Every structure is written in C-alpha cells, then in structure tokens.
Image (tube, rainbow, N blue to C red):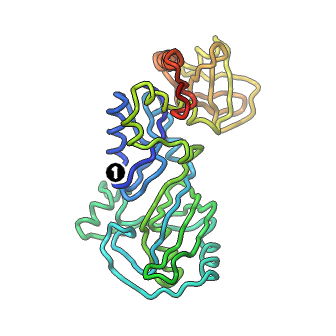
C-alpha cells in the first residue's frame, strides 16, 4: 500500500484517530499523517501510506491555507471555543480598523506559541503543563503570513465576528494569530471555527470524507490513493538511464550537466519509476530519500492491478469506471 490519501478531517477527531481509522479501512501496515490538526479543526489532512511516508516531511514544511471565524469580544483559556471564558469586552470595530490590522499581520510576524499546543519544553508537551495549571516561558518565533483576508461580519448581533483566510508558513498557530488580531482590535477574540483548505499543492476540493470512504468498496478506496510522486510536485525532474539509476539507488552520487537545485525528483528512464529525491550541487546529483527496489516493484504492481480493476489510482477517487 503506497500513496497519499487526502482526508477531509471531521470535526472532533484528532489527527491520529482519523489516521488509525483510515489505516484500518485500507488495511495498510505503514502510515503517517503530515501535520496535526486540532480536534476543533476540519479540512485537508494528507495521510501517507507505505513509501509515501518517506516524503511526508515535505508536507510538514509546506505552506498552508486556513479559513477561520474569530468571535470578537470574548477571550478563552485556550484561544478557541473549547476553553473557558476568561474575559469579555465591548466590541467597537470598524471596517477601517479591520483593514489596518490586516496590513499589520501580513508578512513576517512574531508569535509566542500557545500553552495549549504540542510543542515540547523540557521533554513535555506544553498542553501537559497547561492542563496542570502551569504556564512556562516560551520564546517567540518568526512566521510568515503570505496572504491575509479579514472580513468583518455580524457586527450588529450579540456575537460580532471576523472571517479570516490566511495563507501562512509552517509553524503558524492560527489560534495565536486570532488572539493577537483580537488584541490589536482592542476587544479580544477567540477562534470559534477552523478549517484547513490547502496544504502544499493539495486542496480541500480533492479530499474525501470519512463517511464517503466508509461507504466505498475496497477498489474504490484504493482509487482514492494519489501516487507517491504527488508529494513531489514542485521538485525538478531528473531522469537516469538504467546503469546510473542502479548506482543512484545504491546511494552513489551521479555527475551530469545539471544546474544547482535544492529539490529534485529522480526517475528511471526505462519505466518512469520514481527512485527518490536528491539535490544538485556543482553538477553532482546527491541522493536524499531513496525508495527500495521492493517498494518500486510494489508501486508498479499496484498501478497495474488498479488499472486492471478499471480504476485510475493516479487520479484519485473522482475517477471510478
């Protein structure tokens, strides 16, 4: 079982719970997810199976896009709807205020990681300290908000809110971003809804829900797997002949007329099989994460068996004959 399944993570599920459920449905042996989504959050959760787990770090490092709702005037102990209300303030926010704050939080910004997070301090996750009523010092870190859109909504109702859409770098805490925006507006805020709509080159429109997956046959579930190389969409492609492919797979550097590049996906010219990743420096192709010969053979066999069954594994579950 080798490939990537894009799950629309349901509300209330931890990322690991969702992974274990899908792993069971696919009867897969080796699996991992590519970055935790809080139980409160829904949306794109790429799940990697088999050889795809070798490249899952690429998704951990990828930019992500979120939609969120900020409830204004109410601060909670966790920064989201799961926490206790710790402060309320009147809300007097104008469209001009929102535009000012939007500009303020676009680009490089500093964040202090929230206590209710999985970040570790002295060998323990911060949320463990938080549950024990202990607050520990956290260093601020720089993240980047590539794009930010804030839309003021429901100003005249009991609960004023802002719709937030943010494309951000890895390591960005949207709860912290929401809290900081609330402070900048002078009224405080907490996250009442959160949805990840994109990560790396994957979008929520490509995802399958857990309910839909459960209702499928085994062949249909298999057709939901995207190929391993879908994780390498932004890599430069290098193709090697049979002799050089074998040497590359054994971990040897190859020399060629290639420009320096940080991310390379390497294929065999004989059958277009993915061999692994590399980088090029001074004309040398330097191996990174490599697939094993059994993994390469299994991936070829998987593609053949799925096509024989009348499905297209490379296109995902939208294509079912």
- Residue tagged by mark 1? 13
Q: Is residue 241 left or right of residue 306?
A: right
Disc 1, SS = loop
Which corner quadrant holds the N terminus? Answer: top left
Mark 1 neighbour density, 10 Å: few (under 14) some (14–19) many (20 or more): some
Q: Is residue 261 above or below residue 116?
A: above
Q: Which residue is rendered at x = 57% and y = 23% of the image?
A: 275
Q: Is residue 105 left or right of residue 4?
A: right
Percent of width and height locating residue 170:
52, 54
Asked where in the image residue 11 lies, by quadrant, the reply is bottom left
Q: Is residue 185 above or below residue 172?
A: below
User: How many numbered dots are placed on residues in this image?
Assistant: 1
Asked where in the image residue 251 lies, by quadrant, the reply is top right
Which corner quadrant holds the C terminus? Answer: top right
Q: Which residue is rendered at x = 62% and y = 30% of the image?
A: 265
Percent of width and height locating residue 35:
44, 48
- Farthest residue in the front direction? 321
Percent of width and height locating residue 224:
48, 32
Q: Which residue is rendered at x = 46% and y = 61% of the image?
A: 194
Q: Which residue is more in the foreground, 286 or 32?
A: 32
Q: Is residue 239 left or right of residue 46?
A: right
Q: Is residue 225 above or below residue 68?
A: above
């Amino acid at each position: 079982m080798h490939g990537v399944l894009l799950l629309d993570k349901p509300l209330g599920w931890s990322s690991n719970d969702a992974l274990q459920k899908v792993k069971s449905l696919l009867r897969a042996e080796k699996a991992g997810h590519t970055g935790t989504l809080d139980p409160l959050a829904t949306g794109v959760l790429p799940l990697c199976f088999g050889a795809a787990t070798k490249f899952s770090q690429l998704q951990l490092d990828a930019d992500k896009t979120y939609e969120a709702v900020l409830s204004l005037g109410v601060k909670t102990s966790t920064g989201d709807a799961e926490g206790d209300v710790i402060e309320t303030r009147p809300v007097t926010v104008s469209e001009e205020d929102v535009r000012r704050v939007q500009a303020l939080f676009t680009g490089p910004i500093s964040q202090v990681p929230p206590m209710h997070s999985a970040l570790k301090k002295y060998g323990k996750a911060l949320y463990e300290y938080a549950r024990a009523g202990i607050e520990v010092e956290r260093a601020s870190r720089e993240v980047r908000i590539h794009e930010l859109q804030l839309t003021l909504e429901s100003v005249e109702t009991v609960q004023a809110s802002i719709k937030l859409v943010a494309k951000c770098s890895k390591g960005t805490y949207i709860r912290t971003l929401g809290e900081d925006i609330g402070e900048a507006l002078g009224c405080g805020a907490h996250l009442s809804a959160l949805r990840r709509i994109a990560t790396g080159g994957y979008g929520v429109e490509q995802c399958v829900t857990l309910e839909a997956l459960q209702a499928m046959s085994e062949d249909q579930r298999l057709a939901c797997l995207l190929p391993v190389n879908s994780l390498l969409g932004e890599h430069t492609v290098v193709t090697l002949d049979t002799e050089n492919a074998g040497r590359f797979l054994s971990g040897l550097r190859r020399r060629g007329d290639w420009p320096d590049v940080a991310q390379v996906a390497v294929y065999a010219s004989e059958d277009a099989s993915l061999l692994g990743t590399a980088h090029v420096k001074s004309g040398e192709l330097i191996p990174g994460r490599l697939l094993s010969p059994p993994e390469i053979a299994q991936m070829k066999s998987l593609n053949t068996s799925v096509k024989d069954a009348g499905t297209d594994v490379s296109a995902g579950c939208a294509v079912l004959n």
